[in-house]
Amino acid sequence: MTTPAPAVPRGLIPLLSAANFAIGMGAFLVIGALTPIAGGLSLSPEGAGWILTVYALSYAVLSPLLVASTGRIGRRTVLVAGLGTFAIAAVASALAPSLAALLGARVLAAAGAGLTTPVGAAIAAALAPPEARGRTLALVFLGLTVAQVVGVPFGSWVAYTFGWRAAFWIVAVLAGACALAAWRIVPAGLRFQPVRMADLGAVLADRRLVFAILFTATYLAAIYVPFTYLAPLLEATVGLGRDGVTAMLVVAGLGAVAGNLAGGALADRLGPVQTLILLAAAQVAAMPMLSSLPLPLGWVALLILGWNAAGYAFNSGQQVRIVGLAGPRAPVALSLHAASIYLGAAIGAAAGGWVIAGYGLRGLGVAGGLAAVLALAHIVASHRLDGRSVRP
């Protein structure tokens, strides 16, 4: 049986959010720093996109295996190990002398993140009362979305101003500080129902649950077709430079934060499935507009704000749905959800590179919208597989 902590330790939820901030900045600063990295390593934009793709694929493979294999270890130890590994990987990225070395460091970073994020989510979901689970998970994942507002734009500015290696040094400091804080704040005896490799096998054998989890990948793949290449898209179509790209990434991050908070409230109010259907439909409408650039700068900012708000509102609803379907195997299911986030990012980044090669940067918005149609069909089909109608 689950052995819950007697109370949520003071500062635990902010710590989990801060840890996700460090993870989010380290994972996605590549998006804002794509041009400096490409220039420093003599790569094309679509070639540099593979830096994100390798990270994402590594996360997708490693996270479920690592979570399942560490299920009997105390949560504090796992969190500290994950954050420490992520910090070391950031140092290795900053020192990488070649593309091959950078890709190796990104694999190590994916291993650290693959432990940190799902374990933190499982702790929050287990401690929160059911009626507040969506809002609690939204707070935990707020760090990832705040990373979009502050971390990724700041990393982009640093990369353009001081070089992309300096941005990774900042990530290393943040992750190391979170590891030290986790050792102090997370109780040493905090444990939940042990997770085993057999639980991973049981989740993967549940067709209904796996199909529901994979909606995360299809939804994020659609978004990351254009989002991975947002900086070069804005440079080529709107004529933005360092400061303009940074400002638009801040706008994107503000939309992500607003969407994250609204998504938790919507999931609690409307139910997770209805929320996910609404958000997928919004992506179908929003992303093709990116192919109409250039637009007046104010309209560009509104488009990016709304697009990212809808994009990041899905996470809480999807997690609430997965927890409800998975029951006691929720930690493994949430690790697969987190893995699917990065699997979707990898697929979207790779697909975006192919779109650029075939149709140019202007083809990204239309391609993302078409991919979002598939995501919408996926959530509807998944809900019907559960034996319920789409309407509440």
Image (spheres, rainbow, N blue to C red):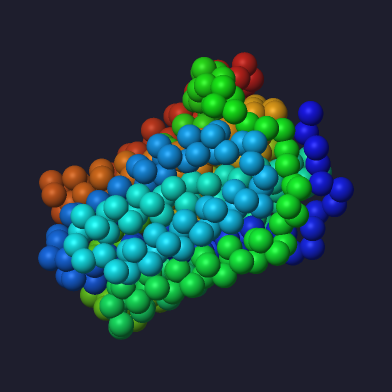
Is residue 198 something one can see in this rendering? yes
Q: Quadrant of the N terminus?
A: top right
Is residue 293 shown above or below 381?
below
Q: Residue at x 28, y 78 (%)?
A: 163
Is residue 85 shown above or below 67?
below
Q: Residue at x 52, y 53 (%)?
A: 82
Q: Quadrant of residue 49?
A: bottom left
Is residue 238 something one can see in this rendering? no
Q: Image check: 134 left or right of 44?
A: right
Given residues 254 and 87, the one toward you in this image is: 87
Q: Residue furthest right?
A: 6
Given residues 76 and 208, the one toward you in this image is: 76
Q: How many marks?
A: 0
Residue 176 in the image: state x and y as whole percent.
53, 67
Q: Image check: 43 left or right of 219?
A: left
Q: Residue at x 27, y 54 (%)?
A: 103
Q: Quadrant of the C terminus?
A: top right
Q: Residue at x 79, y 63 (%)?
A: 10
Q: Quadrant of residue 351?
A: top left
